[in-house]
């Protein structure tokens, strides 16, 4: 369960993504959260949002490294 200050933003936009094997799949939902939550989103793990169970396709970390920008986040495509 993600809650403040470790919450997430959910986008229900359907889009084509590549899974961890490089195969193109349709993502029904994208979750954006803090990079610290990465261990919760391993490929093929289950995520439930509003009663709908999905699987993690491939998490993508946005990390600015030593620049320490406020936009660092984890984007997770759900299928």
Image (cartoon, helix red, strand yellow):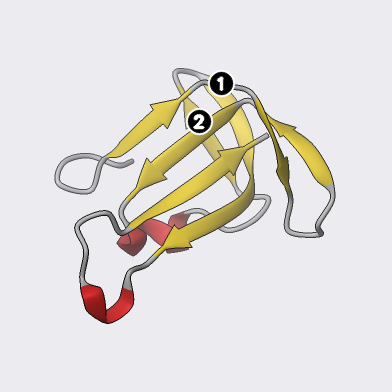
Residue under the point 63% across and 25% down: 28
How far apart in space, not on screen, are marks 1 and 2 (Cα)?
5 Å
Residue 73, x across and y down, in percent:
34, 54
| Mark sitting on residue 7 | none
Image vertical order of residue 4 relative to residue 15, above or below: below
Q: In this rendering, would 6 be left or right of 60?
A: left
Tell me whether the residue at label 1 lies in contact with that at label 2, contact meaning CB atoms closer than 8 angstroms. Answer: yes
Image vertical order of residue 71 relative to residue 27, above or below: below
Residue under the point 39% across and 42% down: 32
Q: Which residue is mark 1?
A: 52
Q: What is the residue that sits farthest to the right in this orientation?
A: 23
Q: In this rendering, would 20 be left or right of 10?
A: right
Residue under the point 40% across and 29% down: 10
| Mark sitting on residue 48 | 2
Element on which disc 1 rests: strand
Q: In this rendering, would 61 be left or right of 21?
A: left
Residue 46, x across and y down, in percent:
59, 42
Q: What is the residue that sits farthest to the left in this orientation?
A: 5
**Quadrant showing the N terminus:** top left
Q: Residues within 10 Å of mark 2 (few under 14, many from 20)?
A: few
Image vertical order of residue 12 relative to residue 70, above or below: above
Q: Quadrant of residue 65?
A: bottom left
């Amino acid at each position: 369960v993600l809650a403040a200050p470790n919450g997430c933003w959910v986008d229900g936009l359907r889009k084509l993504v590549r899974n961890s094997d490089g195969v193109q799949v349709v993502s029904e939902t994208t979750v954006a959260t803090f990079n610290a939550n990465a261990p919760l989103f391993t490929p093929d793990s289950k995520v439930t949002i509003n009663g709908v169970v999905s699987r993690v396709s491939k998490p993508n970390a946005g990390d600015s490294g030593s620049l320490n920008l406020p936009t660092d986040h984890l984007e997770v495509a759900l299928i």
